[in-house]
Amino acid sequence: MSNKTIATMIVSVLAAVLAAGQSTNNLGSTESVPRLVKFGGVVKDEGGHARTGVVGVTFAIYKDQEGGVPLWLETQNVQADSKGNYKVLLGSTKLDGLPAELFTSNEARWMGVQSEGQGEQPRVLFASVPYALKAADAETLGGKPISAFQLVTPQSSNGTATQGVLPASEQANEITCSGGTACKAAFIPKFSSNGGSASVNDSIISQIGSVVTVTGEVVGQTGFFRSGTNGTIFQATQTNSTSGSAIGGVAEGTSGIGVQGAGVTGVLGQALSNGIGVEGTLGSVGVKGQSPIANGLGVWGEADASTGTNNGVFGEIFSTTSDAAGVLGVSNASSGTTYGVRGINSSSGQFAAGVEGENFSATGVTFGLVGSTSSTHGIGAVALGVGESSTGFRLIGCCPAGVWGDTSSNAGGATALAGTADDARAIYLENNSPSGIPTAFMLQDAAGKLALQAGGLGAGNGFCTIDTTGHLFCQNGVSTMASLDTGQRQVALYAVESPQNWFEDFGTGELGSGKATVTLDPTFAQTVNLASDYHVFLTPVGDCRGLYVSQKTATGFEVHELGGGLSNVAFDYRIVALRHGFEKVRLADITERVKKLNTPLPKISPGPQIPLTRPALPIVAAKSKVAGSIPPSLSSK
């Protein structure tokens, strides 16, 4: 609510019941003056929008414009219209209304208004009308009507009294106990009858020393406990060691709140032993926490014990309905770095986790942890080891991803994504892409470095690598596999290795009168360097004097029979040429590259396993303790 809105509150104009105007001319009348003052204003939310419906508002009267403690206060549920306007009668929740003593001095009085969930707004100065409440004393003496006094008989001139009717004075109350067992020590008395001879019984309230005990149910209007100290304003302690609750709050309306707290710490629940600090049951929301301020916390759960399986916040459901959740976190912000659920852990203990998800069902398609996103640039789950890498910082958000692993560490064995298994696949990838998108894509940004390494450890094992030039290197050779016996057997075939990058081609030809011209396959010719020398190997298929090659060019060569022979024999040929662009590569030294194969892997050492035993469920064990702790008269209504 703005200062302008506060300033326009209708204070003096709507003052309702003026004491002087409501009193009668009968000096003996005992009718009391209604100490009520009309008050109107506007309620708005933090965004300046009008609030509608029922809103809890606290009205307080102060001596000063700022600071100090209230001289009087009350809380009412006001009915705000569509523009947030409301009107109330101040004092209507009090038996005696507004105390007239508030306006007996010549000092100013200031009104403070505080809507639920908000701070007190700037105070407004009272006008003169409420001070008219004190006018009721004009017809009383010491607050009592004239009928409470006996009139003195007027004297005549000769000293004798004149005749007149004297009104009877009010008789003093006579308090008697209603029975022999009533009026016990320490109990606050309760009147059991009206009139001059009132009787009293023992109430449900007793006091011994500074301890006040209420043995029954307290039902009344909304009230306030206010204190300026840093202690606990109100504390309820349940001393029963097996059952019962210290405080039970029940809202019987369709949208009420059982227990509501506001402030730095709205509601603080502290559990001793295996009890529960705060529990909410029944209704659509068990426990709700709401914070309208920056950096505030809606719900704070804290387990301070240094031993045992402790839970700061524990959520549990018994519903079998789809999408039911033990703990549900929702972030409704349309911008900013927000979290539906966030877990933070500073422990250095083995397997300590910020967030853990487990599913103990032995059947069904279940998940321990699920992350999903609807954004075309979103990521279902992000896992960072130590921190975010510069590569990840550059690429995250490029495209939708189910899981993104990243690490800023370059320590030995550091990895952004790891998969391990015993007698199973550590990682499984499958893709159904009619357009031909590859199932896996690996990219090395550093030129001339390894993009892939695969192999095994131990004697007789080795690694194959693929570098950024696309070269495949294998320590123990490159092989292929062939199926035999209609697929019943498979055998390995091995490639012929060479110290240089040779490409070869094969073909057949036939002499005509001892001569033939062979034209090279133009596609093959583009893969090799035919400008340099290439090799041709001939094999005659028939009897002849022998064959030789001449006139080698970039497009072909000639074949002749030795000794000027003129046969028409057929022949086979094999051409070997250096790969284009790799003519000078011969027995390249890859010693340093092989050293990279020995980069430290994750340390292999036996250790404790991640605990997967189902944790204790404290709320299940305590449900019978909490049930019935709310008085039956409230919970059954």
Image (tube, helix red, strand yellow):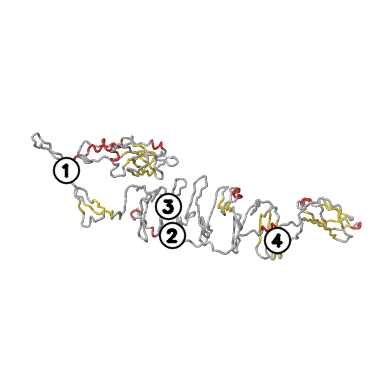
Left or right of 567: which side holds 411? left
Instruction: Work out whether mark 3 precedes mark 2 in sequence or the reverse, and give the earlier one.
Output: 3
The percent coordinates of residue 513 (x first, y second) are: 90, 55
Numbered mark located on residue 377 in the image: none
Q: What amino acid is at disc 4?
A: Gln
Mark 3 to mark 2 CA distance (whole Å): 17 Å
Secondary structure under tag 4 reads loop
Instruction: Work out whether mark 4 precedes mark 3 in sequence or the reverse, and give the earlier one.
Output: 3
Residue designated by label 2: 618
Q: What amino acid is at disc 3?
A: Val
Compared to residue 79, the image places residue 543 above or below, namely below
In this rendered view, identify the residue nearer to me: 257 or 293.
293
The percent coordinates of residue 40 (x first, y second) are: 36, 38
Secondary structure under tag 1 reads loop
Residue designated by label 1: 169
Q: Note whether residue 446 is visible.
A: yes
Secondary structure under tag 2 reads helix
- Of circles 4 and 2, which is in front? 4
Instruction: Work out whether mark 3 precedes mark 1 in sequence or the reverse, and give the earlier one.
Output: 1
Left or right of 441: which side holds 55? left
- Is disc 2 surrounded by few (<14), some (14 to 19) or many (20+) residues within 10 Å? some
- Of circles 3 and 1, which is in front? 1
- Of circles 4 and 3, which is in front? 4
Residue designated by label 3: 287
Asked if disc 3 and disc 2 are in contact, CB closer than 8 Å, the reply is no
Compared to residue 598, the image places residue 392 above or below, namely above
Q: What amino acid is at disc 2?
A: Pro
